[in-house]
Image (tube, coloured by chain):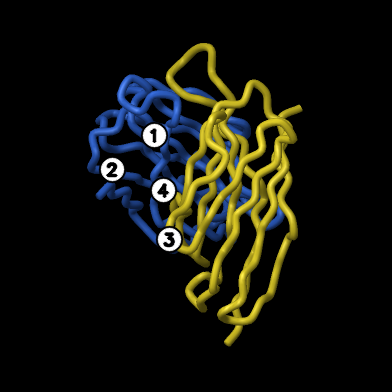
Chain colours: A blue, B yellow
C-alpha cells in the first residue's frame, strides 16, 4: 500500500511566520505534488517535483517555495505566512511515466489544515 | 480553456438509495478521467480511472461511465451507505507532450450526504 504522510494534521501560525509543511512517501515515487484546497475552488496545484532537486511551478506558486533534497520527501515553505494562505494543504505522489504509462495515478496524503492568524 | 464541471454541487439521499453524480469536461487533448472520494478532513482516494477507450468501470458499489464523444462522465452509487457521505471529485488528465506529468484538471466536487 502506498503511504503518503504529512507532518501535521492541524497547524496554527501567525502572520509573517515562516512555515514548513513536510510530506513523505514510501513508494519510491519520482513525482510529488503540493495542492491547496479551498471551499468552492477545488484543488489547485502549487508546485510539483519530478526528481530530486527538480521543481516546477503549478497554477498558484506565489507566496510559496518548495524543497526536494531526498526522493521521499517534499517540503512546502511559506516564507512569510499570510491570512489568505489559510487552507487545507494536500501532498500527493505518483510513479514515473515509464512505469505508469499515461495514467499518472496520484496518491494523496491526509492533508494539513493550516490556519494563519 | 480546460475545465471540469460537476453537478450537483451537493446532494442528500436516504441510506439504501441509488444516486448518480455528473461530470462534464472540456479538456483537450484528453488522456484519462478519474473519480476520487474525499472524506471530510482527509485526502482524496482514487475510485476509478478510465482512459479514452473505456466507457464503464466498477469498483464495488461505484460504477463510473465515460462518453468521450459528449465529454461526459457519471459516477453511480448503488445501495448507498452512511459511509458514502463524502465529496466526490472528478479529475481529467490532459495529455502532456513534454515533461514527466500529465496535466490534471480538478472539478470542484459534489458533496454527498447519506442520511439514515
Mark closest to the chain's N terminus, 4 or 2: 2
Q: Position of residue B70 (x, y in %)?
A: 74, 35
Q: Closer to the camera: disc 2 or disc 3?
A: 3
Question: On the image, numbered disc 2 is attached to which residue?
Answer: A25
Numbered disc in front, either 4 or 3: 3
Question: Which SS class for mark 4?
Answer: strand
- Asked if A69 appears above or below B8 in the picture, the reply is above
Residue assigned mark 4: A108
Q: Is residue A82 left or right of residue B60?
A: right
- The quadrant of the picture occupied by the C terminus of chain A is bottom right
Spatial CA distance of label 4 from label 2 is 10 Å
Q: Earlier in the sequence, mark 1 or mark 4?
A: 1
Are the two marked residues, 4 and 2, in contact with CB atoms closer than 8 angstroms? no
Which residue lies under the disc numbered 3? Answer: B60
User: What separation in Å lies between label 1 and label 3 (alpha carbons)?
Assistant: 29 Å
Query: Pointer 4 and pointer 3: residues touching (CB < 8 Å)?
Result: no
Pointer 4 chain: A
Residue at coordinates 53% horizontally, 55% vertically from top-left?
A: B63
Q: Which residue is mark 1?
A: A32
Amino acid at each position: 500500500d502506498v503511504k503518503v504522510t504529512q507532518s501535521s494534521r492541524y497547524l496554527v501560525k501567525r502572520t509573517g511566520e515562516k512555515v514548513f509543511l513536510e510530506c513523505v512517501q514510501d513508494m519510491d515515487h519520482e513525482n510529488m505534488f503540493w495542492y491547496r484546497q479551498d471551499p468552492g475552488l477545488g484543488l489547485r496545484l502549487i508546485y510539483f517535483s519530478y526528481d530530486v532537486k527538480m521543481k516546477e511551478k503549478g497554477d498558484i506558486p506565489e507566496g510559496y517555495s518548495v524543497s526536494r533534497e531526498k526522493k521521499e520527501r517534499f517540503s512546502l515553505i511559506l516564507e512569510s505566512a499570510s491570512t489568505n494562505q489559510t487552507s487545507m494543504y494536500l501532498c500527493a505522489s505518483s510513479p514515473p511515466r515509464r512505469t505508469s504509462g499515461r495514467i499518472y495515478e496520484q496518491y494523496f496524503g491526509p492533508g494539513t489544515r493550516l490556519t494563519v492568524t | 480553456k480546460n475545465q471540469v464541471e460537476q453537478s450537483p454541487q451537493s446532494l442528500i439521499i436516504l441510506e439504501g438509495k441509488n444516486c448518480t453524480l455528473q461530470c462534464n469536461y472540456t479538456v483537450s487533448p484528453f488522456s484519462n478521467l478519474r473519480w476520487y472520494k474525499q472524506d471530510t478532513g482527509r485526502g482524496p482516494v482514487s475510485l476509478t480511472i478510465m482512459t479514452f477507450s473505456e466507457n464503464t468501470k466498477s469498483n464495488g458499489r461505484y460504477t463510473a461511465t465515460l462518453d468521450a464523444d459528449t465529454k461526459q462522465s457519471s459516477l453511480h452509487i448503488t445501495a448507498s451507505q452512511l459511509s458514502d457521505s463524502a465529496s466526490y471529485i472528478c479529475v481529467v488528465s490532459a495529455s502532456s507532450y513534454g515533461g514527466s506529468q500529465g496535466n490534471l484538471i480538478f472539478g470542484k466536487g459534489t458533496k454527498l450526504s447519506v442520511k439514515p
